Image: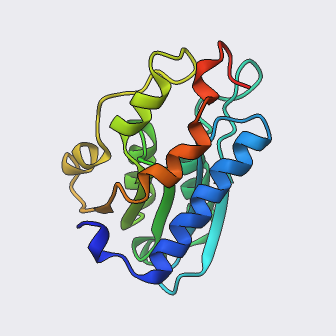
Amino acid sequence: MNAGDLSARDMALLRQAIALSERARAMGRHPFGALVADADGRVVTRAINDSVPPGGDPTRHAELVAVAAAARRMTPDELAACTLYSSAEPCCMCAGAVYWTGIGRVVYALSEHGLLLRTGDHPENPTFSLPCREVFARGQRQVSVVGPVLEDEAGRAHAGFWTRATGP
């Protein structure tokens, strides 16, 4: 699937995820945001990255937090009809969380490659070169993926953020 497969509602929800990444940055967090919407486009959960060292939990990526919260509230059938909207491509950990919670679709803005171009070798974000599609391809259940979409828009939250030794 590609960007042409997205509805106006999809684009609006993806922009909400991007806005969450901007909010995360404004709060001194790594600039990532995600939300889960049900089959009717109603937002079920929203999350920002909550993994900033030294006190943060490095597993609290926005995508993982959002899908875990949705899994606590919804049935497996409801989750299968949900979409995760993310300001950036889910990393391999978050892709695993999407898979295990049963979310059926992912729409993301900034690609893993685009993120790596922005973060470089920053010690707080040692980016994997492992697209989420490759993670999902190894599973027994299909997860539909659309992205990257709106990469430049999503990338603005990262502008200048990763050039500092320890973030903002």
Vertical order, 77 against 48 (above or below): below
Residue 149 vertical position relative to residue 7 in the rendered view, above or below: above
The residue positioned 54% from the left and 74% from the top of the image is 12
Please provide percent x and percent y for residue 33: 60, 51
Instruction: Decide if residue 145 is on the left or right side of residue 53.
Output: left
Residue 24 is left or right of residue 62, and the answer is: right
Q: Is residue 164 left or right of residue 13?
A: right
Camera-side residue of 144 and 110:
110
Q: Residue at x 56, y 65 (%)?
A: 15
Q: Where is 66 relative to 75, above or below?
A: above
Q: Could you tell me which quadrant the N terminus lies in?
A: bottom left
Q: Quadrant of residue 161?
A: top right
Pinpoint residue 99: horizontal percent, then vertical percent: 37, 54
Where residue 17 appears, as percent x and y from the top left, is 58, 60
Do we see residue 70 in this rendering? no
Q: Is residue 105 left or right of residue 21?
A: left
Q: Quadrant of residue 3?
A: bottom left
Observer able to see residue 29? yes
- Front-lying residue, 90 or 156: 156
Which quadrant would residue 5 be assigned to in this image? Answer: bottom left
The residue at the point 25 percent across, 66 percent down is 2
The scheme the figure's colours follow is: rainbow
